[in-house]
Image (cartoon, helix red, strand yellow):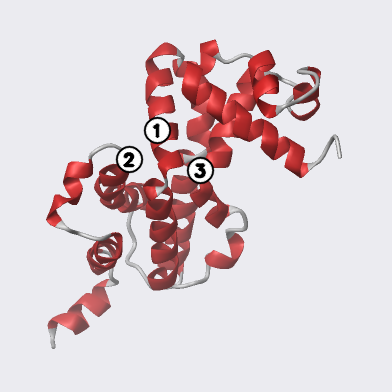
Amino acid sequence: MEHGPARRQQILDAAFDEFSDKGFRGATIKSIAERAGLKSPALIYWYFPEGKQELFYAAAEAKVTFLSVFKDPQPLMDAPPEHVLPTIAIAYLTFAADPTARRLFRLLLAEAPRHPGLLEPVVARGPLRVLGFLSAYLTKQIELGRLRPHDTRSSARAFIGMLIPQALSHVLMPQLQLDGLTDDEHIHTAIGIFLAGLAPHGREADDGGH
């Protein structure tokens, strides 16, 4: 078929490769179409009517595979943190360990000083979306009595912040892997520390009496 999900994905893959190799300015609709094996560049506009900028956002977002965790977030809202937070952490660090993540990180790092406005929708679709979900989720957990009251905007950032050094060991700083800490070990310890710090005060008192 000329049109369909497979064709759209073909365009996204070609666009990501072109942007990675040539940067936003160097990649063109024509070169992306050629790389995707399209008969005409016009077909790209069938999927991405706004052109190269829209295609850049979509190509970047498509590579952030861990965002699939948040496609249907509602069922997660009532689940306990001991189940939800590891799910997010595993997806995040699994993505960071993928070679595609390194290419995406380098692309965004290169484009940030050249086209600062270009990254605003990328941030909105990625980091802000994740932080927004986490803040809402943690607020729900407070309402359920599983966590003590606190500013969930800060705890959402703190949770992701605990994962960033481990993610950087995959995408930018392999030297951080020299201590042998595995992703599973880090996730287990970090979430334990995080939840202990946010335990309801009554639970803290009970634990202290043991």
Marks 1 and 3, how far apart at CA = 10 Å
**Residue 152, image x and y in percent?**
37, 53
Q: Foreground residue, 204 or 30?
A: 30
Q: Foreground residue, 168 or 150?
A: 168
Helix, strand or loop status at disc 1? helix
User: In percent of the image, x 43 and y 26: which residue is there?
Assistant: 107
Kindly indicate whether the residue at mark 3 contacts the one at mark 2 (C-beta within 8 angstroms).
Answer: no
Give the crowd class for mark 1: few <14, some 14-19, many >=20 residues within 10 Å: some
Residue where numbered disc 2 is placed: 171
Residue where numbered disc 3 is placed: 64
Kindly indicate whether the residue at mark 3 contacts the one at mark 1 (C-beta within 8 angstroms).
Answer: no
User: In percent of the image, x 61 and y 20: which residue is there?
Assistant: 53
Residue where numbered disc 1 is placed: 105
170 versus 112 height, above or below: below
187 versus 172 height, above or below: below
162 versus 44 height, above or below: below
Is residue 46 rendered to the left or right of residue 22?
Answer: right
